[in-house]
Image: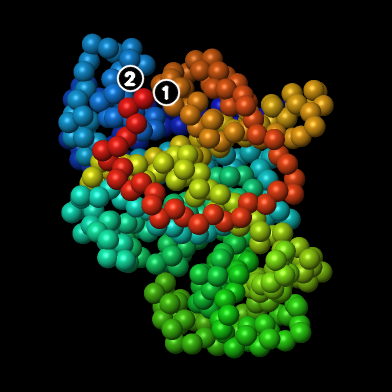
Amino acid sequence: MIRETSKRIIKRIRKKLYSNEFLINNRISNKNFTRKRKLPFVSLVIFMINMIKQTLQKELTRFMEIIKDTKTNISKSAFSQSRLNLKPEAFIELNETLIEEFYKDKTIKKWNGFRICAIDGSKLILPTHSRELMEKFGTLSNGMIIPEAQISTCYDVLNEIILDAELETLQVGELKQAVCHLNKLSNGDLVIFDRGYSAVWFYYFMVQKNIDFVNRVPKNFIKDAEEFRLSDRIDEIIEIKSVPQKSRDGLQRYNITDFKPFKIRFVKVNLDNGEIEMLATTLLDQEKYPIEIFKDLYFKRWGIETNYNRMKSYLNIEEFTGLSEIAIKQDFFVSMFIFNLQTVIALDSQEEMEKEKLKNKNKYKYKINRNLSLGYMKDRVINILMSDNPEYYEELKELFKTNPVPIRKGRKNPRIPQDKNRRIYFMNRKRAV
């Protein structure tokens, strides 16, 4: 049976877009979007969803051609003024609607009954020459006068859905952002963290919320962990009976004052390069979760690294359409929505493609080309969201299936160091074609 989750999601998003409640919730003032404008509320939102990557004026002219309103001319200035009346939370709300509808599907992928999530942060280079952004977010620590923001995402690595995203100043740490992500999770979620999230208070916080985790532990973490690391033991459950004052302070920030002893499990895994890594986890059942499963389980965290690469290389989330704080937030959260919309359409297209390839007895399994399919969404997403004509959706789904990528098992993708000379001046060098 062919799934049609994306069709159902798009229908629900379209309904929300045109609802009066959505408009009221996401305008800055009650006076905004009350008169007939050249770029009304729904048109403004959909225009921004259409991945504005070329010059603004060309994008605006092209948009009016697609919606068959060539008599109306919208200037860059008119767009810039209109966007100031739109809350960035509009795109968060659309994304939450998409996520809610997606997880109604009973065929979503899980691991041993868990939804596997990864949480990690990254830095986002903001447009230069904006004093407002420098004062709001902060600048690079190496002395260069370039504003940066701290971002963090909670990512379902099996279903490739961004469950939550945070954009904050550089002063906000990754752990604080991770706590915000946990508010979107519950019992049945298993979160994988890298070593930067190792903190006893954070472990206890997750235990209190009944959220399971696997965390790569750094050296000299806590006494019990270091003793285990230096021993010959490879699997051990310990009870943490007390926490240092620093951890108590961390818990008090979130109104947790009644600390109780809790158990945690340490395991050692052998990496392909011969190194031994230590993991901390709340999966205490040693029969149900033998030590052999943890290497592959932790490796699933790599999905969030791939996700950040897609966002920065394919979606170009560091190419912004404005120099104000509200423009930065709008562009960031609209990118999260676009990423998820692409994913749900790709999943439906993937299922159809697999059935077709199975009939042809292909040597390899294939997956949707995420780079090309994102390009196919450009402009077509306008018609999909503005019209209930199913032909627009079916056409896009067929395009998603063109030029798929073969899945070759056993390949490894080593981490590639970031190019220090990569382009950072985004505002004035947008593509015009």
Q: Nearer the viewer, residue 119 or 53?
A: 53
Residue 234, compared with residue 385, is above or below; it is below
- Residue 281: x %, y % from top left: 65, 71
- Residue 97: x %, y % from top left: 47, 39
Q: CA distance from mark 1 to mark 2?
A: 9 Å
Query: Which circle's residue, 1 or 2, is located before the other in the chain?
Result: 2
Residue 313 visible (yes or no): yes
Amino acid type, callout 2: Arg
**For the residue carrying disc 1, how many other residues have a C-alpha within 10 Å: few (<14), some (14-19), or many (20+)?**
some
Q: Nearer the viewer, residue 235 or 357?
A: 357
Identify the image quadrant of residue 78: top left
Element type at mark 2: helix
Image position of 276 (left or right of 160): right
Marks 1 and 2 close (CB-CB < 8 Å): yes
Residue corresponding to mark 1: 379
- Tell me which residue sits at (52%, 86%) in the image: 243
Amino acid type, callout 1: Asp
Q: Nearer the viewer, residue 290 or 36?
A: 290
Q: Can you name the residue that lies furthest to the front here?
A: 421
**For the residue carrying disc 2, how many other residues have a C-alpha within 10 Å: few (<14), some (14-19), or many (20+)?**
some
- Tell me which residue sits at (51%, 44%) in the image: 310
Residue 151 visible (yes or no): no
Image position of 401 (left or right of 291): left
Residue 111, compared with residue 313, is above or below; it is below
Image position of 326 (left or right of 99): left
- Residue 382: x %, y % from top left: 41, 23
- Tell me which residue sits at (41%, 41%) in the image: 316
Element type at mark 1: loop
- Tell me which residue sits at (36%, 46%) in the image: 423
Residue corresponding to mark 2: 62
Identify the image quadrant of residue 432: top left
> Which of the colour schemes (rainbow, by chain, secondary structure, one colour) is used?
rainbow
